[in-house]
Image (cartoon, grey):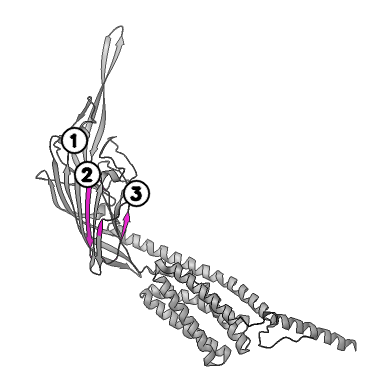
Amino acid sequence: MSDQLSSNTEYQEQKKIRNITSGGGFKIAMLVVLVLLLLIPIFMIRSLITERSHRADTAEESIMEAWGSQFTLYGPVIRIPVVEREEIRTKTEKEGEKIEIITRNYVLWITPKDIVIRADFSAQKKRRGIFSVALFSGDVSLSGNFTFERAKDELKQNQTIYPEQAEIIVGLVSQKGIRKIITADWNGSELFFKPGNRNYSIGYSGNNGINASSPFDTAGINTFDIKFAVQGGKSMRALPIGETTQAYISADWPSPSYQGGFLPLAHTSSESGFNAEWEISYLSRSIPLFWFTDERGDNDNNKKELFGVDFFKPLDHYALNERAVKYAILFLVIPFLTLFFMEVFSRKSIHPAQYLLSGLANIIFYLLLLSISEHLSFSLAYLIAAVALTCMMTLYARSLLETWARSAYMGLVMALLYLILYLTLNAEDWALLIGSIVAFVITGVVMFLTRKLDWSSLNIKGERQDHD
Protein backbone atom coordinates (compact mmCIF):
# COMPACT_ATOMS: atom_id res chain seq x y z
CA MET A 1 0.00 0.00 0.00
CA SER A 2 2.85 2.39 0.90
CA ASP A 3 4.59 1.53 -2.42
CA GLN A 4 1.41 2.40 -4.32
CA LEU A 5 1.12 5.74 -2.47
CA SER A 6 4.77 6.48 -3.14
CA SER A 7 4.34 5.65 -6.83
CA ASN A 8 1.21 7.81 -7.04
CA THR A 9 3.04 10.72 -5.36
CA GLU A 10 5.96 10.36 -7.77
CA TYR A 11 3.54 10.29 -10.71
CA GLN A 12 1.84 13.47 -9.50
CA GLU A 13 5.21 15.23 -9.15
CA GLN A 14 6.23 14.17 -12.65
CA LYS A 15 2.88 15.34 -13.98
CA LYS A 16 3.40 18.71 -12.31
CA ILE A 17 6.85 19.02 -13.89
CA ARG A 18 5.43 18.03 -17.29
CA ASN A 19 2.65 20.59 -16.93
CA ILE A 20 5.20 23.30 -16.12
CA THR A 21 7.68 22.39 -18.87
CA SER A 22 5.01 21.89 -21.51
CA GLY A 23 3.33 25.20 -20.75
CA GLY A 24 3.62 28.18 -23.05
CA GLY A 25 5.13 30.38 -20.34
CA PHE A 26 8.00 27.98 -19.74
CA LYS A 27 8.68 27.69 -23.48
CA ILE A 28 8.71 31.46 -23.89
CA ALA A 29 11.15 31.77 -20.99
CA MET A 30 13.37 29.15 -22.62
CA LEU A 31 13.29 31.06 -25.93
CA VAL A 32 14.32 34.26 -24.16
CA VAL A 33 17.27 32.43 -22.59
CA LEU A 34 18.24 31.00 -26.00
CA VAL A 35 18.11 34.43 -27.62
CA LEU A 36 20.40 35.82 -24.90
CA LEU A 37 22.82 32.91 -25.32
CA LEU A 38 22.90 33.36 -29.10
CA LEU A 39 23.93 36.99 -28.66
CA ILE A 40 27.39 35.64 -27.77
CA PRO A 41 28.17 34.29 -31.28
CA ILE A 42 26.63 37.44 -32.75
CA PHE A 43 29.15 39.56 -30.86
CA MET A 44 31.91 37.21 -32.03
CA ILE A 45 30.85 37.75 -35.66
CA ARG A 46 30.82 41.52 -35.13
CA SER A 47 34.37 41.26 -33.80
CA LEU A 48 35.33 39.19 -36.85
CA ILE A 49 33.89 41.85 -39.18
CA THR A 50 35.91 44.52 -37.36
CA GLU A 51 39.07 42.42 -37.58
CA ARG A 52 38.61 41.81 -41.32
CA SER A 53 37.92 45.51 -41.85
CA HIS A 54 41.15 46.43 -40.03
CA ARG A 55 43.03 43.92 -42.15
CA ALA A 56 41.57 45.50 -45.29
CA ASP A 57 42.66 48.95 -44.05
CA THR A 58 46.17 47.63 -43.45
CA ALA A 59 46.30 46.18 -46.95
CA GLU A 60 45.05 49.49 -48.39
CA GLU A 61 47.69 51.44 -46.48
CA SER A 62 50.48 49.16 -47.73
CA ILE A 63 49.30 49.60 -51.34
CA MET A 64 49.05 53.38 -50.97
CA GLU A 65 52.40 53.68 -49.22
CA ALA A 66 54.11 52.30 -52.30
CA TRP A 67 51.96 54.45 -54.61
CA GLY A 68 52.10 57.79 -52.82
CA SER A 69 49.54 57.74 -49.99
CA GLN A 70 46.67 60.20 -49.87
CA PHE A 71 47.61 63.23 -51.96
CA THR A 72 47.59 66.43 -49.89
CA LEU A 73 48.78 69.78 -51.21
CA TYR A 74 50.07 72.63 -49.01
CA GLY A 75 51.02 75.68 -51.03
CA PRO A 76 52.56 77.30 -52.81
CA VAL A 77 54.09 79.89 -50.49
CA ILE A 78 57.07 82.24 -50.82
CA ARG A 79 59.97 82.02 -48.37
CA ILE A 80 62.05 85.21 -47.97
CA PRO A 81 65.02 85.48 -45.55
CA VAL A 82 64.85 88.39 -43.10
CA VAL A 83 67.68 89.73 -40.94
CA GLU A 84 66.92 91.86 -37.89
CA ARG A 85 69.69 94.03 -36.47
CA GLU A 86 69.56 95.45 -32.96
CA GLU A 87 72.03 97.91 -31.48
CA ILE A 88 72.87 97.48 -27.82
CA ARG A 89 74.74 100.40 -26.26
CA THR A 90 76.80 99.89 -23.11
CA LYS A 91 79.01 102.33 -21.20
CA THR A 92 82.18 101.54 -19.29
CA GLU A 93 84.65 103.82 -17.45
CA LYS A 94 87.65 102.60 -19.43
CA GLU A 95 86.22 102.22 -22.93
CA GLY A 96 83.36 104.67 -22.76
CA GLU A 97 80.28 103.96 -24.85
CA LYS A 98 80.34 100.66 -26.68
CA ILE A 99 77.89 99.65 -29.43
CA GLU A 100 77.18 95.98 -30.04
CA ILE A 101 75.09 94.87 -33.00
CA ILE A 102 73.06 91.68 -32.57
CA THR A 103 71.55 90.04 -35.63
CA ARG A 104 68.64 87.63 -35.68
CA ASN A 105 67.58 85.58 -38.67
CA TYR A 106 63.91 85.18 -39.52
CA VAL A 107 61.84 83.95 -42.42
CA LEU A 108 58.94 85.80 -44.00
CA TRP A 109 56.30 83.53 -45.49
CA ILE A 110 53.90 85.03 -48.03
CA THR A 111 50.78 83.35 -49.39
CA PRO A 112 49.42 83.96 -52.92
CA LYS A 113 47.13 86.87 -53.61
CA ASP A 114 45.19 84.67 -56.01
CA ILE A 115 45.59 80.97 -56.73
CA VAL A 116 43.79 78.58 -59.06
CA ILE A 117 44.17 74.84 -58.45
CA ARG A 118 43.19 72.47 -61.25
CA ALA A 119 43.33 68.70 -60.84
CA ASP A 120 42.33 66.10 -63.41
CA PHE A 121 42.68 62.45 -62.38
CA SER A 122 42.23 59.00 -63.80
CA ALA A 123 41.25 56.51 -61.08
CA GLN A 124 41.25 52.73 -60.84
CA LYS A 125 41.08 49.97 -58.26
CA LYS A 126 44.28 48.18 -57.28
CA ARG A 127 44.03 44.83 -55.55
CA ARG A 128 46.21 42.94 -53.11
CA GLY A 129 44.71 39.53 -52.56
CA ILE A 130 41.01 40.02 -51.86
CA PHE A 131 41.46 43.65 -50.77
CA SER A 132 41.30 46.68 -53.08
CA VAL A 133 41.81 50.44 -52.88
CA ALA A 134 41.07 53.35 -55.22
CA LEU A 135 44.27 54.81 -56.67
CA PHE A 136 44.53 57.77 -59.02
CA SER A 137 47.06 59.59 -61.16
CA GLY A 138 46.93 62.72 -63.26
CA ASP A 139 47.95 66.36 -63.47
CA VAL A 140 47.72 69.17 -60.94
CA SER A 141 48.32 72.76 -61.97
CA LEU A 142 48.86 75.79 -59.73
CA SER A 143 48.62 79.28 -61.18
CA GLY A 144 48.27 82.72 -59.66
CA ASN A 145 50.33 85.59 -58.32
CA PHE A 146 52.11 86.99 -55.27
CA THR A 147 52.49 90.59 -54.14
CA PHE A 148 54.38 92.25 -51.32
CA GLU A 149 51.81 94.94 -50.48
CA ARG A 150 50.20 93.08 -47.55
CA ALA A 151 53.48 92.35 -45.77
CA LYS A 152 55.53 95.51 -46.37
CA ASP A 153 53.81 97.56 -43.66
CA GLU A 154 54.64 94.92 -41.06
CA LEU A 155 58.40 95.11 -41.56
CA LYS A 156 60.28 96.91 -38.81
CA GLN A 157 62.85 99.58 -39.59
CA ASN A 158 65.64 97.37 -38.30
CA GLN A 159 64.59 94.41 -40.48
CA THR A 160 66.08 93.79 -43.90
CA ILE A 161 64.60 91.36 -46.40
CA TYR A 162 66.52 89.59 -49.16
CA PRO A 163 64.01 89.09 -51.99
CA GLU A 164 66.71 87.91 -54.38
CA GLN A 165 67.06 84.82 -52.15
CA ALA A 166 63.33 84.08 -52.16
CA GLU A 167 62.09 80.56 -52.78
CA ILE A 168 58.75 79.13 -53.79
CA ILE A 169 57.66 76.13 -51.74
CA VAL A 170 54.97 73.50 -52.43
CA GLY A 171 54.37 71.26 -49.40
CA LEU A 172 53.31 67.63 -49.78
CA VAL A 173 52.35 64.97 -47.25
CA SER A 174 54.18 62.27 -49.24
CA GLN A 175 57.19 62.84 -51.51
CA LYS A 176 56.09 59.83 -53.58
CA GLY A 177 52.97 61.71 -54.56
CA ILE A 178 54.82 63.79 -57.16
CA ARG A 179 56.03 62.06 -60.33
CA LYS A 180 57.47 64.86 -62.47
CA ILE A 181 57.32 68.58 -63.20
CA ILE A 182 55.56 69.36 -66.47
CA THR A 183 55.59 73.18 -66.36
CA ALA A 184 57.36 75.50 -63.93
CA ASP A 185 57.15 79.21 -64.75
CA TRP A 186 57.98 82.15 -62.47
CA ASN A 187 57.67 85.66 -63.88
CA GLY A 188 58.36 84.28 -67.35
CA SER A 189 61.44 82.28 -66.29
CA GLU A 190 61.70 78.55 -65.76
CA LEU A 191 61.94 77.23 -62.22
CA PHE A 192 64.18 74.36 -61.18
CA PHE A 193 62.57 72.44 -58.32
CA LYS A 194 64.43 70.44 -55.70
CA PRO A 195 62.99 68.09 -53.05
CA GLY A 196 62.34 69.47 -49.56
CA ASN A 197 60.06 72.06 -48.02
CA ARG A 198 62.67 74.35 -46.39
CA ASN A 199 61.04 74.03 -42.95
CA TYR A 200 57.64 75.01 -44.29
CA SER A 201 55.39 72.98 -42.00
CA ILE A 202 52.12 74.83 -41.61
CA GLY A 203 49.49 72.12 -41.20
CA TYR A 204 51.77 69.09 -41.39
CA SER A 205 55.12 67.74 -40.25
CA GLY A 206 58.09 66.33 -42.12
CA ASN A 207 60.28 67.63 -44.93
CA ASN A 208 58.14 66.51 -47.86
CA GLY A 209 57.65 68.96 -50.68
CA ILE A 210 59.52 70.79 -53.43
CA ASN A 211 61.27 74.16 -53.56
CA ALA A 212 62.83 76.39 -56.18
CA SER A 213 64.75 79.67 -56.21
CA SER A 214 62.38 82.46 -57.27
CA PRO A 215 63.72 86.04 -57.03
CA PHE A 216 60.87 88.13 -55.71
CA ASP A 217 59.83 91.54 -57.09
CA THR A 218 58.67 93.50 -54.06
CA ALA A 219 57.41 96.39 -56.21
CA GLY A 220 55.21 94.49 -58.63
CA ILE A 221 53.20 91.34 -59.27
CA ASN A 222 54.92 87.95 -59.29
CA THR A 223 53.15 85.33 -61.40
CA PHE A 224 53.56 81.59 -61.31
CA ASP A 225 52.31 78.68 -63.40
CA ILE A 226 53.27 75.22 -62.15
CA LYS A 227 52.00 71.92 -63.45
CA PHE A 228 53.14 68.52 -62.27
CA ALA A 229 52.11 64.88 -62.61
CA VAL A 230 50.99 63.30 -59.36
CA GLN A 231 49.61 60.07 -57.97
CA GLY A 232 47.83 59.08 -54.78
CA GLY A 233 45.15 56.94 -53.23
CA LYS A 234 41.67 57.27 -51.70
CA SER A 235 41.60 61.06 -51.40
CA MET A 236 42.90 64.42 -52.59
CA ARG A 237 43.17 67.39 -50.23
CA ALA A 238 44.38 70.97 -50.64
CA LEU A 239 44.96 73.86 -48.26
CA PRO A 240 43.18 77.12 -49.24
CA ILE A 241 46.37 79.12 -48.98
CA GLY A 242 45.54 82.12 -51.17
CA GLU A 243 43.78 85.38 -50.44
CA THR A 244 41.33 83.96 -52.96
CA THR A 245 41.51 80.25 -53.69
CA GLN A 246 39.72 78.67 -56.62
CA ALA A 247 39.87 74.93 -57.15
CA TYR A 248 38.58 72.63 -59.88
CA ILE A 249 38.84 68.87 -59.37
CA SER A 250 37.64 66.26 -61.85
CA ALA A 251 38.12 62.50 -62.19
CA ASP A 252 36.60 59.51 -63.93
CA TRP A 253 35.40 58.09 -60.59
CA PRO A 254 31.61 57.70 -60.26
CA SER A 255 31.20 58.08 -56.51
CA PRO A 256 32.97 61.12 -54.98
CA SER A 257 32.57 62.11 -51.35
CA TYR A 258 33.40 65.76 -50.68
CA GLN A 259 35.16 66.24 -47.37
CA GLY A 260 37.06 68.80 -45.34
CA GLY A 261 36.45 72.29 -44.06
CA PHE A 262 34.83 73.56 -47.27
CA LEU A 263 32.27 71.94 -49.55
CA PRO A 264 32.20 72.71 -53.29
CA LEU A 265 30.12 75.56 -54.64
CA ALA A 266 29.04 73.39 -57.56
CA HIS A 267 29.52 69.78 -58.50
CA THR A 268 28.24 67.17 -60.93
CA SER A 269 28.67 63.41 -60.95
CA SER A 270 27.68 60.52 -63.19
CA GLU A 271 28.83 57.02 -64.03
CA SER A 272 31.61 58.50 -66.15
CA GLY A 273 33.05 60.70 -63.38
CA PHE A 274 32.66 63.93 -61.43
CA ASN A 275 33.55 67.64 -61.52
CA ALA A 276 33.68 69.94 -58.50
CA GLU A 277 34.43 73.63 -58.01
CA TRP A 278 35.46 75.61 -54.90
CA GLU A 279 35.98 79.31 -54.26
CA ILE A 280 37.37 80.16 -50.81
CA SER A 281 38.21 83.58 -49.37
CA TYR A 282 40.90 84.16 -46.77
CA LEU A 283 38.16 85.65 -44.58
CA SER A 284 36.67 82.15 -44.25
CA ARG A 285 39.76 80.55 -42.74
CA SER A 286 42.29 81.11 -39.97
CA ILE A 287 45.47 80.96 -42.09
CA PRO A 288 47.22 84.37 -42.17
CA LEU A 289 48.19 86.05 -45.44
CA PHE A 290 51.82 86.21 -44.23
CA TRP A 291 53.75 85.40 -41.09
CA PHE A 292 57.24 85.44 -39.60
CA THR A 293 59.08 82.49 -38.11
CA ASP A 294 62.60 81.73 -37.07
CA GLU A 295 64.75 79.64 -39.39
CA ARG A 296 63.35 76.41 -37.98
CA GLY A 297 59.89 77.22 -39.28
CA ASP A 298 56.58 76.71 -37.59
CA ASN A 299 54.16 73.85 -37.11
CA ASP A 300 50.66 75.27 -36.88
CA ASN A 301 47.96 72.65 -37.24
CA ASN A 302 45.63 73.69 -40.03
CA LYS A 303 44.31 70.28 -41.03
CA LYS A 304 40.78 71.44 -40.31
CA GLU A 305 41.16 73.96 -43.16
CA LEU A 306 41.84 71.28 -45.78
CA PHE A 307 39.24 70.59 -48.44
CA GLY A 308 38.92 68.02 -51.18
CA VAL A 309 37.34 64.75 -52.23
CA ASP A 310 37.43 61.08 -51.28
CA PHE A 311 37.33 58.42 -53.95
CA PHE A 312 34.52 56.71 -52.13
CA LYS A 313 33.63 53.04 -52.57
CA PRO A 314 29.81 53.12 -52.53
CA LEU A 315 29.53 49.46 -51.59
CA ASP A 316 31.94 49.04 -48.72
CA HIS A 317 30.99 45.47 -47.91
CA TYR A 318 32.52 45.58 -44.43
CA ALA A 319 30.38 48.60 -43.51
CA LEU A 320 27.32 46.84 -44.95
CA ASN A 321 28.13 43.65 -43.04
CA GLU A 322 28.51 45.69 -39.86
CA ARG A 323 25.13 47.31 -40.44
CA ALA A 324 23.51 43.96 -41.27
CA VAL A 325 24.64 42.26 -38.07
CA LYS A 326 23.05 45.06 -36.03
CA TYR A 327 19.69 43.59 -37.05
CA ALA A 328 20.66 40.05 -36.03
CA ILE A 329 18.37 40.11 -33.00
CA LEU A 330 15.36 40.28 -35.35
CA PHE A 331 16.59 37.16 -37.15
CA LEU A 332 16.57 35.33 -33.84
CA VAL A 333 13.32 36.59 -32.38
CA ILE A 334 11.10 36.43 -35.48
CA PRO A 335 12.01 32.85 -36.58
CA PHE A 336 11.61 31.73 -32.95
CA LEU A 337 8.18 33.37 -32.81
CA THR A 338 7.25 31.75 -36.12
CA LEU A 339 8.23 28.29 -34.86
CA PHE A 340 6.47 28.94 -31.56
CA PHE A 341 3.14 29.83 -33.24
CA MET A 342 3.46 26.87 -35.57
CA GLU A 343 4.06 24.71 -32.53
CA VAL A 344 0.98 26.09 -30.78
CA PHE A 345 -1.41 25.94 -33.74
CA SER A 346 -0.19 22.63 -35.22
CA ARG A 347 -0.09 20.78 -31.84
CA LYS A 348 3.47 19.61 -32.60
CA SER A 349 6.05 19.95 -29.83
CA ILE A 350 9.43 21.44 -30.79
CA HIS A 351 12.37 20.80 -28.47
CA PRO A 352 14.48 23.76 -27.24
CA ALA A 353 17.50 22.13 -28.91
CA GLN A 354 15.70 22.45 -32.26
CA TYR A 355 15.07 26.14 -31.56
CA LEU A 356 18.76 26.47 -30.79
CA LEU A 357 19.76 24.88 -34.11
CA SER A 358 17.45 27.20 -36.04
CA GLY A 359 18.97 30.19 -34.22
CA LEU A 360 22.52 29.05 -35.04
CA ALA A 361 21.50 28.66 -38.70
CA ASN A 362 20.35 32.28 -38.80
CA ILE A 363 23.63 33.41 -37.24
CA ILE A 364 25.60 31.48 -39.88
CA PHE A 365 23.88 33.70 -42.46
CA TYR A 366 26.10 36.61 -41.35
CA LEU A 367 29.22 34.46 -41.54
CA LEU A 368 28.29 33.38 -45.06
CA LEU A 369 27.53 36.96 -46.04
CA LEU A 370 30.90 38.21 -44.77
CA SER A 371 32.98 35.48 -46.39
CA ILE A 372 31.21 35.53 -49.77
CA SER A 373 31.13 39.34 -49.99
CA GLU A 374 34.95 39.38 -49.81
CA HIS A 375 35.03 37.61 -53.18
CA LEU A 376 31.80 38.67 -54.92
CA SER A 377 29.70 41.83 -54.96
CA PHE A 378 27.73 42.43 -51.77
CA SER A 379 24.36 42.14 -53.53
CA LEU A 380 25.23 38.76 -55.05
CA ALA A 381 26.70 37.53 -51.76
CA TYR A 382 23.54 38.63 -49.96
CA LEU A 383 21.34 36.81 -52.48
CA ILE A 384 23.32 33.58 -52.15
CA ALA A 385 23.35 33.64 -48.34
CA ALA A 386 19.67 34.61 -48.08
CA VAL A 387 18.49 31.90 -50.52
CA ALA A 388 20.64 29.28 -48.76
CA LEU A 389 19.29 30.13 -45.30
CA THR A 390 15.68 30.44 -46.49
CA CYS A 391 15.84 26.97 -48.08
CA MET A 392 17.53 25.51 -44.99
CA MET A 393 14.93 26.95 -42.59
CA THR A 394 12.04 25.84 -44.83
CA LEU A 395 13.35 22.28 -45.03
CA TYR A 396 14.03 22.20 -41.30
CA ALA A 397 10.48 23.43 -40.56
CA ARG A 398 9.19 20.69 -42.91
CA SER A 399 11.02 18.03 -40.89
CA LEU A 400 9.60 19.43 -37.63
CA LEU A 401 5.99 20.04 -38.73
CA GLU A 402 5.66 17.22 -41.28
CA THR A 403 3.70 19.25 -43.86
CA TRP A 404 4.86 21.50 -46.68
CA ALA A 405 1.93 23.86 -46.13
CA ARG A 406 3.08 24.73 -42.62
CA SER A 407 6.77 24.88 -43.49
CA ALA A 408 5.97 27.28 -46.34
CA TYR A 409 5.08 29.88 -43.72
CA MET A 410 8.63 29.70 -42.39
CA GLY A 411 10.05 30.16 -45.91
CA LEU A 412 7.77 33.13 -46.50
CA VAL A 413 8.75 34.76 -43.19
CA MET A 414 12.48 34.30 -43.87
CA ALA A 415 12.20 35.61 -47.43
CA LEU A 416 10.36 38.72 -46.24
CA LEU A 417 12.90 39.30 -43.48
CA TYR A 418 15.86 39.13 -45.86
CA LEU A 419 14.10 41.40 -48.35
CA ILE A 420 13.37 44.01 -45.68
CA LEU A 421 16.95 43.82 -44.38
CA TYR A 422 18.36 44.31 -47.88
CA LEU A 423 16.16 47.34 -48.48
CA THR A 424 17.21 48.77 -45.12
CA LEU A 425 20.92 48.29 -45.86
CA ASN A 426 20.61 50.09 -49.19
CA ALA A 427 18.58 52.98 -47.81
CA GLU A 428 20.87 54.35 -45.12
CA ASP A 429 18.97 57.63 -44.72
CA TRP A 430 15.68 55.73 -44.29
CA ALA A 431 17.06 52.85 -42.19
CA LEU A 432 15.62 54.07 -38.89
CA LEU A 433 12.20 54.71 -40.38
CA ILE A 434 12.10 51.31 -42.10
CA GLY A 435 13.24 49.55 -38.91
CA SER A 436 10.62 51.35 -36.83
CA ILE A 437 7.81 50.46 -39.24
CA VAL A 438 8.92 46.81 -39.39
CA ALA A 439 9.04 46.58 -35.58
CA PHE A 440 5.57 48.13 -35.38
CA VAL A 441 4.12 45.73 -37.97
CA ILE A 442 5.69 42.66 -36.35
CA THR A 443 4.34 43.63 -32.94
CA GLY A 444 0.91 44.18 -34.46
CA VAL A 445 0.96 40.77 -36.20
CA VAL A 446 1.96 39.00 -32.97
CA MET A 447 -0.80 40.79 -31.06
CA PHE A 448 -3.34 39.81 -33.73
CA LEU A 449 -2.31 36.13 -33.78
CA THR A 450 -2.38 35.85 -30.00
CA ARG A 451 -5.51 37.90 -29.33
CA LYS A 452 -7.63 34.81 -28.51
CA LEU A 453 -4.99 32.63 -26.87
CA ASP A 454 -5.60 31.73 -23.26
CA TRP A 455 -2.04 32.14 -22.02
CA SER A 456 -2.88 31.02 -18.47
CA SER A 457 -4.00 27.52 -19.57
CA LEU A 458 -2.02 27.16 -22.79
CA ASN A 459 -0.40 23.76 -23.29
CA ILE A 460 2.32 23.65 -25.89
CA LYS A 461 0.87 20.42 -27.40
CA GLY A 462 -2.39 22.17 -28.15
CA GLU A 463 -4.22 20.52 -25.26
CA ARG A 464 -5.71 22.15 -22.19
CA GLN A 465 -4.30 21.25 -18.84
CA ASP A 466 -6.46 19.12 -16.54
CA HIS A 467 -8.22 20.91 -13.72
CA ASP A 468 -8.78 18.54 -10.86
**For marks 2 and 3 on the same chain, the one whose residue lies earlier in the sequence:** 2
**In this view, 436 is above or below 5:** above
Q: Earlier in the sequence, mark 1 or mark 2?
A: 1
The answer to whether one can see residue 437 in this image is yes
Q: Which residues are magenta?
A: 239-266
The residue most toward the top is 93
Which residue is rendered at x = 23% and y = 48% of the image?
Answer: 245
- What SS does tag 1 mark? helix
| Residue 169's disc number | 2
Instruction: Quote the CA–CA distance across marks 1 and 2.
Output: 20 Å
Res. 452 image quadrant: bottom right
| Secondary structure at numbered mark 3 | helix
Image location (x, y in percent) of residue 466 = 75, 87
Packing grade of label 1 (10 A; few <14, some 14-19, many >=20) is few
Amino acid type at mark 1: Glu
Q: Indicate yes or no whether the magenta region holds residue 245.
A: yes
State the residue in front, 265 or 6: 265
